[in-house]
Structures are given as structure tokens and as C-alpha cells.
Image (spheres, helix red, strand yellow):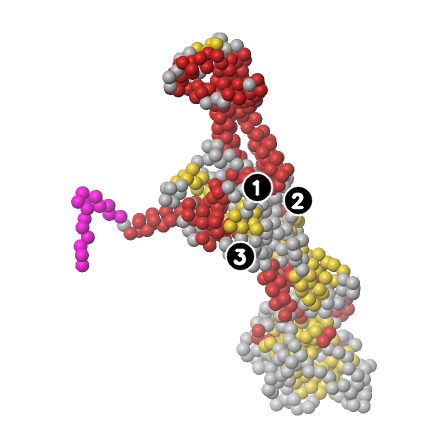
Amino acid sequence: MQKTELPKDNNIKLISMHDEMSSSYLSYAMSVIVSRALPDIRDGLKPVHRRILYAMYKGGYDWSKQFRKSARIVGDVIGKYHPHGDQSVYDALVRMVQDFSMSLPLVDGQGNFGSIDGDPAAAMRYTETRLSKVAQFLIDDIEKNTISFKSNYDETEKEPSVLPAQYPNLLVNGAGGIAVGMATSIPPHNLGEIIDGTLALIDNKDITVKQLMKHIPGPDFPTGGVIIGKDIIKQGYSKGRGSFKVRGQISIEQMKNGRERLVITSIPYQVNKSVLNERIAQLVREKKIEGIKDIRDESSREGIRVAIDLRNGVEPETVKRQLYKNTQIESSFGFNTLAIVDGKPQTCNLKDFLTNFLSFREDVVIKKTKFDLQKAEERAHILIGLSVSVENLDKIIKIIRSSKTPDDAKKAILSTKWKINKSQKLISLVENKKSKGAYSLSEPQVVAILELRLQKLTALGINEIEVEIKKLAELITKYKKIISSKKELLKVISDELKNIKEKFSVKRRTDIIDAVLNYDIEETIQKEAVFITVTLQGYIKRGSLNNVKQQKRGGKGKTGITTRQEDSVVQTLSVNTHTSVLFFSTEGLVYKIKAWKIPEGSSVSKGKSLFNILPLKSHQSISSIMPFPEDDPESKDLMIIFATSQGKVRKNSLEDFSSINASVNIAMKLDPNDRIVGVKICRDDQDAMLSTKLGKCIRFETKKLRVFKGRSSKGIRGIDLAKDDQIVSLSIIQNDKTSKNGKKSSADKAELKAKEKF
């Protein structure tokens, strides 16, 4: 192995692996945070977006010029400022074109730049772009020493560290990004409202977030929608963190055939419309959303329009709630307002955003004004020299003609004291020094005099010089006032903001409502008649009664369920989807679930196992199921009778089972080796009949059974059983009814032994 030679000066630093990894990772993390993932609070841009805009500005691709190939712009960006892949730069450029991604697109595009359906943009060689009008207000005055520049990656170019933005772009267009150990998610806002809030801050530095929200009520997404929860927005604006719900807008239309239709006219921000439509169609196929007949995407350049035709008799509001519950038409947007402030990541509230922008803008306007003041003073100084030369024209010409070289002429003019008369007043307008009838020209003035074109010496030219000096004098006074007066400075910023609002403000697109979203899931379920079928082996399914047609006498009927081998149907109920269904196990337990929770199946399906629906153990089985008539005013008079295999019976009020839920609940206590064989609902004018394995029966009036309080008792003996006999069924008989089977013999005439007392 070759030995590594040590440096001759023995300049070796010993660093632990832990410290080196910690330091290197921290450097990497900060590089990602500051130089890639998080936006700057001042101009609202990440480095890649700033570099794209600056490259377009330097290339002259502004809104008044023709479009240029996107590939050319991407090449400028990666070649000069952004040493990364061309596709990542193009993706960032594409997003700045999309009006469904940006509240105010910063780039105008020509060609295919993708869609809200998730369609990708065309390749960069096919599309063309240029700066948008509003982007110009992010870049204006960049050449006036308003911001600092830094070297690019190979130190061959200079790039801006920030753009001199004239409006709070970070709030207007929002931002999202994932850094190392942190992320940001800032929603877009309405330009007019943000400017109103900034103006309110200018008028009152002590304004609170709550007061700012009178001007900025909440985010305004380019895709529209409805934000739910004003209090949640206030929390996000105050703490910089939070999450609120955003719904698409769904209207109800009446169709010519009398049916109704739901129309989606806006969707939540960053939701893929095509994926949303596919999700709705999938839920319809899986019968998780019922009542939808057809779905059509009728969107166009005019806006989003997804038509959902409903079946006859379907309640539109119920389908709307189903869509909100099960699809992205209702989504969450998380506030995490993290931005780069003074070179460090910081979570900001609403006022922090505006305060930092305003402070930055004050600095930019001061620097811009100082630059303009310097240029105005320099120009006025030159014009004063020209005015003095015109007043002493003959002497100037004499010196020039007598000089051997231009340098000799320059030195002679510089060393001469020039008499002034008319120029005295002009000098007093723009210069502070006292001339007292004589004036010494500076070198820049002499150079301008020597370069003066003869046509400027006409009366018109002399007058133009005087007019320009007076205008410059006014500007100089104005600039000095702005620099020295905070009030004038803020007035300039206010006027800039008002001008931008007048040109680019649009009507709010996202509504904000104050509502609670804790609606019952059952509200999303259509109320319709259904039947429930249970088999001997414990399989259950739900079907719509609308699929069952009435047949005449002698009809063959229709297949209702396909059973497994050695299985058979033991019970069928007719209920509606909102009806509660009680399930009684042979072990004395009871469960209650809504009918809509029972899986729906086709006429040939075998159903689902009860073990998948109820928390049953492997040794348990269901002996009886029955509907619980919650909305029936007569249900208070109804009773429930239990019968066990060992001959025990018990009667309870149906109200004792109103508080049952899907978890384990005791229905009846049982002796060892005893089990429930039947549970029935009855009234006091009915009889109960117990049947045994050995063919014995007993019939008795239900009113003679006393009503037990609670569900924990074992009941009383209902029949004396032989040693090897047991109860196999419980039936309820109406005294004055006759059987429709056989010879219509009256049930009252059946010779059954009746038990008189219990």
C-alpha cells in the first residue's frame, strides 16, 4: 500500500468523524434551505425563479417584445446562473406560466404549458415565453444600485441576491418547498387585498393581525373554491401554522327532463381535475357513492365545468356531501409560513410578511432615489456648464481657436473665472455654492462644452437647456425631500402600490365561509329501501329494493343470493339504509349497526362474512337479527322477547336497547351450556310460541310475561323440557289473523298447550 505523504509544514488538523459529519451536514442543509428550497421574504422568490426572471430581463425578453424559445431561456439560466439540470429549470419556468398555479403569472407563455388535468407541458423546444407585465414590477430599478449582486457559480457573471420587488409577491403568489428538516407552504392571495393590507400597515404601524384581516380575509386561490373556517385562517395568520379545509364549488341545476344535475365549477388548489373525475367514477362503480347516472367533463377556456347527472328521486345535497366526504373536492391546505428572513429561515405571521416587505421596500426606494438624485445633479451640473458657456460664447470660442490641442483648450477653460448673469438664477436652483457673479467650470462641464454640437447654440437649443434645468431642479428638490422625510418616502411606496393595484387587481376568486365540518357521515347516505339477507353460515349482504320487480302469481321469482354449498338463507329483512339493525348472538351478546354499513352485493353475490362486520369471536354465531324502529312513535309500546335453548324466556322494553352500539353489549345472561335461539319484537296483543326439538310446542300471551328492567337477568322458565329436549325456535302469533298457507286454518284454533302464569 502506498503511504500518504504528510505536508512538510506539519499543518495537520485532527477532526473527529462526528464533528466533521455534523459540520458538513449542517452546511449542506443550510445550502438547500437558503439556496434552493425556501423563498426570500423580500421578493417572494426561490433562487431558481429569481435567476429565470433575471436571465429573461438581461436577454431583453420583456412583455413588449416578441416571444422567445423556452429552450433559449433555459440555456441562459443554466449556463450563467443555475448549474443544475435543464428539466428542473424548465419545470420552474412552466409553473410561472400556469394561471392555475400562480395567482399572478410572472411569465407569458405561448404553446402547451400543461393543464389542471395534470397534462405535462410540451418540450422546451416547442414552447415560447417572455416576461409578463406584472413581472416588470419585480425587476424595475434593478440597475439603480437598489440591491446587491453576487458572483455566479463560476464567478464569470453577477446575479442579484434579491429583486427590488414593488409588491409583496410572496403573499400574492405563495410558495411551497421542502428543505432539510423543514418545509414551507404559503397559500396565494388576492393582489388587491394584499396591497390594501400593506397600505393599512403604512397608515398604522401598530396594526394587529386581526385588524389586517379586515383587508386580507384569507387566501385567494387561482382555482377558486371555498375556504371553510375563518377562525382557522386567523390562527394561521397569527402563528404562521395551521390547516384549513378548501372545497370546490358545486351548484345544482334543473334538467329539462325534470332530473337534477350537480355541476362542479371550481376545485381546490393543486387538485388534479382528471384524477378527481376518475375518483368519482371509481366510487360510483364500487357503489360507495349512489345516485349518480353519468359524469362528464365539460371544461373549456371559459372555466371548469364537470356535470354529474343524478338518478330520479336522488337528493342532490346528499350526493354533494358524499363527494365532499370521499373525494378531493374537499381538501386540506396546511399553513406553514416559513421564509428566508435576513439569511435565516423564520416562521412569519401575516404582519411579519408585510413589515419585512415594507422595510425592504423603504431601503430600495431610498437607494433608488439617491441614484436618481445623483444622476439629476450630474445632469444639472452639465447643463449649468453649457448655460455658462453660451453666456460666454465668444470668449470660449476664442480660447478654443487659440489652443493648439484639445487638452490646452480644456486647461485654459478650467483655469478661467467666467462671468455669469442669466445663469446665476439657474445655478441657484440646482447648486448650493455661491457664485457671486463668477463661476469656475468643472472638468465634466468642460468636456461637455468641447463636445457640444453647434445646433445647441441656436435660440431654441438655449431655451431647451433652461427648461431642462428647471425640471431637474424640481426633481432634485423632490428627491431630497423623499430621502429626508419618512412621510414622503411612504407616500412614494403607497403610490407605487396603488398603481399596481389599479393595473393588475382582480376580483376575489375564493369564497370564505364560517362553518363547522363535523357533519354526520350518515348525511352522505341516500335514504332508500333495501333488503338484508343472512345465511345459515353467517354471510350477509344488502340489496336495493329498486332492483326487485313485483311479479304476478305463479312467477318464478328472481335470484336474490348465491349460497355456498350446504348453506341456506335463514332470514331476510326489509328496511331502509338509515335503519339500525340489531344482531343477537347465541352467547347472549347484542350489536347494533346502521343498514348502510352492511356491504351491498349483487343478486348473484354470496355476501360478506359477519365476522368482517361485527367484532365476533371464532366460536360465536348470530341467532337473530331485527330492525330497530328508532323513528317510529309507536316503538315505545313495543317489547322484545328472548328464548333460550334450555327453555328460559324474558321480556324487555325495546327502549332498553336504544343505547346499543357496534361494540360488545350484553343482551341476556345465560346459564352454562345455554344459548339464545330466538329474539322477537312483540306487542301485548300478540302470543308467543316456543317449539322444541322433540316436536313439542307451547303458546302463551305475551302480556302475561312481566317486563324485566335492564339486560343482565337470565329470565324465567317458559316451558318444562324433557331430559333430552331443547327449544329450537320462537314465534310471534297474532290472535285474530289466519295463516295464508294451506287451508287458512285459524291460529286461534290450534290445539296447543298454553301456559297460564309465569
Residue at mark 2 to residue at mark 3: CA–CA distance: 31 Å
Identify the secondary structure beneath mark 1: loop
The residue located at (62%, 52%) in the rendering is: 223
Q: Is residue 430 left or right of residue 661?
A: left
Q: Which residues are magenta?
A: 1-15
Q: Main secondary structure of the magenta part?
A: loop
Label 3: which residue?
A: 122
Q: Which amino acid does the dot numbered 2 rest on?
A: Lys
* Residue 9 colored in magenta in the image: yes
Q: Residues within 10 Å of mark 2 (few under 14, many from 20)?
A: few
Q: Which amino acid does the dot numbered 1 rest on?
A: Ser
Q: Nearer the viewer, mark 2 or mark 1?
A: 1
Q: Which one is in front, 140 or 6?
A: 140
Q: Is residue 214 left or right of residue 57?
A: right
Q: Which mark is residue 260?
A: none
Quarter occupied by the C terminus: bottom right
Q: Which mark is residue 507?
A: 2
Q: Which amino acid does the dot numbered 3 rest on?
A: Ala
Percent of width and height locating residue 54: 48, 42
